[in-house]
Image: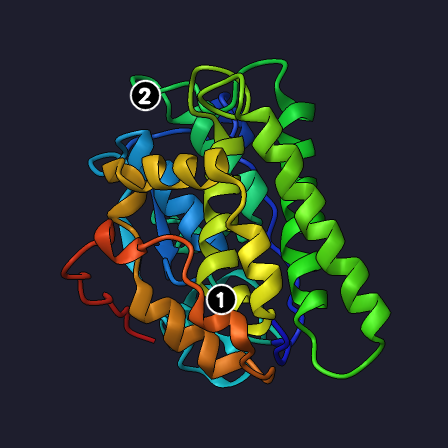
């Protein structure tokens, strides 16, 4: 998606440990997530939070789909950022995992937040980050980031070298081929059970169809549809309440249009998945914090 980039900000990257002496340790009702599910990083965390059944353990504050502060930040997060970093430069962006006991930010780094939710709060939920699966999950993240998201953005970029766009489109289609082949012999990416790899891929496919597709030509999108197992997998996960309940199609569209500087192409007319059949019908109003 050709777009303007928000001002770069420093990530907060503390971790939640299992030892009380570590400072941040897993405790019910201590932490809070601040999420805008229209953002793909926030959507990953929201899905993971629901899969683990953490509503009564780790509350979520919902933020507007479109950041409402200069530089791409959220006004509701400014006080947290200022408390965590004096005169913090740059925007107050989501996602945020905060500590209600200290009023400070623990982490803004999505991979760390996902791992800590899966490993520190999954007492009764599924094992989304199995021991020994680190490299397999990391490989899926790279495949999604480089083979799908980056390739789709480059293939849909206006101007520039047509050969480079064609190469990016070919990379995208090869990546979808790999995933189609992998899903021929298993229900989920790493086997029979859902893991963080599936959360990553599902969110990436949502973005591919609801955002990046709008900048691709019709021929490329028609070729994308030629992966029936992959899109059936996406629909099956969308039908799971932990996934589909967080779909905010209007918010995704508004966020896209607020930042995108690209041109719409013929592929915009070729919808792959009817995501509206699975989305939450009445999205909850964002909860704003004072500050």
**Residue 67 appears left or right of 70:** left
**Residue 130 appears left or right of 64:** right
Residue 214 image point, x, y percent: 51, 71
**Residue 249 appears left or right of 222:** left
Q: Is residue 79 above or below residue 148?
A: below
**Residue under label 2:** 125
Q: Which quarter of the rendered picture does the N terminus lie within?
A: bottom right
Residue 79 image point, x, y percent: 41, 70
Can residue 3 be spotted in the picture?
Answer: yes
Residue 39 image point, x, y percent: 45, 61
Q: Across the whole image, how many numbered discs are drawn on residues?
A: 2
Q: Give residue 11's quadrant in the image.
A: bottom right
**Residue under label 1:** 211
How busy is the neighbourhood of tag 2: few (under 14 within 10 Å), some, or many (20 plus)? some
Color encoding of the figure: rainbow
Please tell me which residue is depicted at 81% across the width and 59% down the height of the picture. Answer: 167
Q: Is residue 151 above or below residue 161?
A: above
Please tell me which residue is depicted at 25% across the width and 58% down the height of the picture. Answer: 276
Please tell me which residue is depicted at 35% across the width and 72% down the height of the picture. Answer: 76
**Secondary structure type for disc 2:** loop
Front-most of residues 90 and 67? 67
Front-most of residues 251 and 21? 251
């Amino acid at each position: 998606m050709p777009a303007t980039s928000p001002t770069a900000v420093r990530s907060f990257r503390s971790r939640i440990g299992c030892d009380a002496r570590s400072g941040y340790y897993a405790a019910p009702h201590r932490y809070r997530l601040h999420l805008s599910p229209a953002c793909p990083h926030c959507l990953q965390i929201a899905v993971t939070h629901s899969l683990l059944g953490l509503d009564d353990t780790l509350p979520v504050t919902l933020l507007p789909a479109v950041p409402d502060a200069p530089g791409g930040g959220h006004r509701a997060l400014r006080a947290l950022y200022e408390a965590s970093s004096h005169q913090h430069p740059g925007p107050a962006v989501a996602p945020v995992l905060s500590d209600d006991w200290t009023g400070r930010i623990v982490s803004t780094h999505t991979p760390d937040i996902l791992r800590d939710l899966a490993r520190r709060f999954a007492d009764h939920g599924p094992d989304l980050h199995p021991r020994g699966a680190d490299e397999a999950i990391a490989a899926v993240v790279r495949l999604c980031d480089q083979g799908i998201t980056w390739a789709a953005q480059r293939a849909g970029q206006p101007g520039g070298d047509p050969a480079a766009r064609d190469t990016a489109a070919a990379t995208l289609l090869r990546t979808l081929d790999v995933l189609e082949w992998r899903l021929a012999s298993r229900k989920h990416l790493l086997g029979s059970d859902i893991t963080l790899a599936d959360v990553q891929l599902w969110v990436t496919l949502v973005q591919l169809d609801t955002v990046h597709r709008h900048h691709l030509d019709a021929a490329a999108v028609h070729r994308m549809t030629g992966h029936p197992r992959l899109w059936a997998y996406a629909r099956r996960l969308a039908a799971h309440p932990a996934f589909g309940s967080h779909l905010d199609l209007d918010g995704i569209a508004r966020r896209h249009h607020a930042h995108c500087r690209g041109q719409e192409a013929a592929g915009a007319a070729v919808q792959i998945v009817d995501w509206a059949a699975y989305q939450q019908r009445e999205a909850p109003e964002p909860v704003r914090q004072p500050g």
